[in-house]
Image: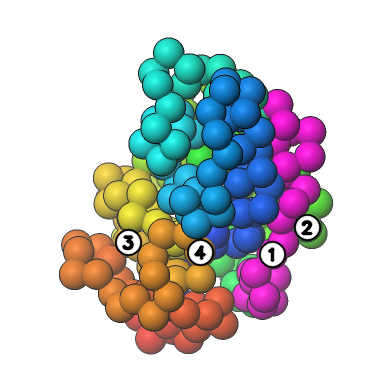
Amino acid sequence: MRYTTILFDLDGTLMDTSQGIFASANHALSCIGYPAMSDEALHNFVGPPLADCFRTVCGVDESFIDDAVRAYRAIYHEKGWSQSEAYSQIGTVLKLLSDRGARLAVSTLKLEYEAMKIVSHFHLLQYFDVVTGTDLTSIHTKYDTIRESLRRLDVTDFSTAVMIGDTIHDYEGAKQANIDFIGVDWGFGFMQGETKKQLPGFIAMIQDPTQLIPLIDTLS
């Protein structure tokens, strides 16, 4: 198997977390006096760092960004995290990959303890060697989480690693970390039915989790 280390994004790749994210975003907006936004308008809220989401997707003035982030994290920690569900067949695919000896990691821009809580609550933690998220000090970008996952797994040959994600931000983090990327079209970033982008290291686009293992086999 060519890819012996497989990194997964969380939001929009492993889990549909949109309900909790959108509700938490609107709660935060109300806390700073901004109007609620529709789910469609918040579609791009998933993927970039949280402050950037409020800045670019919601149009929040810079002076309110920190307050919005704090309000979001408080309500998400309270209940937003549980308003999620794993995509169909994800658990089966993770088990098959794990049984075949692949080392699996979550690399997400969620705070790490929130990511651990979600993955554990939905019975996926058993398949992962590492869960890497952001913190409040040094790990802030997708590149940071990917490189930290690789460090924790002691990966030195980056040609054996691949990142699986649903947004261009996942791809850019993988490219910066010098590992390959496989896109999924069931999340928040790439359109359903979208074909592989002609970008360096963008190996393929898949439309269903069950396509991942056959794809990896063909690349071996």
Mark earlier in primary sequence (1, 2): 1
Q: Quadrant of the N terminus?
A: bottom left
Say which amino acid is labelled 3: Asp
How far, Cα to Cα, is label 3 from label 1?
A: 24 Å
Residue position for label 2: 122
Which residue corresponds to the image point at 44% horizontal and 36% vertical from the top-left?
58
Q: Which mark is residue 180?
A: 3
How far, Cα to Cα, is label 3 from label 4?
A: 19 Å
x, y percent for residue 139:
47, 29
Tell me the element at label 2: loop
Is residue 99 visible in the rendered structure shown here?
no
Q: Is residue 85 magenta?
A: yes
Residue position for label 1: 86
Residue toward you, 28 or 100:
28
How far, Cα to Cα, is label 2 from label 3?
A: 27 Å
Q: Is residue 204 left or right of residue 130?
A: left
Which residue corresponds to the image point at 40% horizontal and 21% vertical from the top-left?
61
x, y percent for residue 95:
69, 72
How far, Cα to Cα, is label 4 from label 1?
A: 11 Å
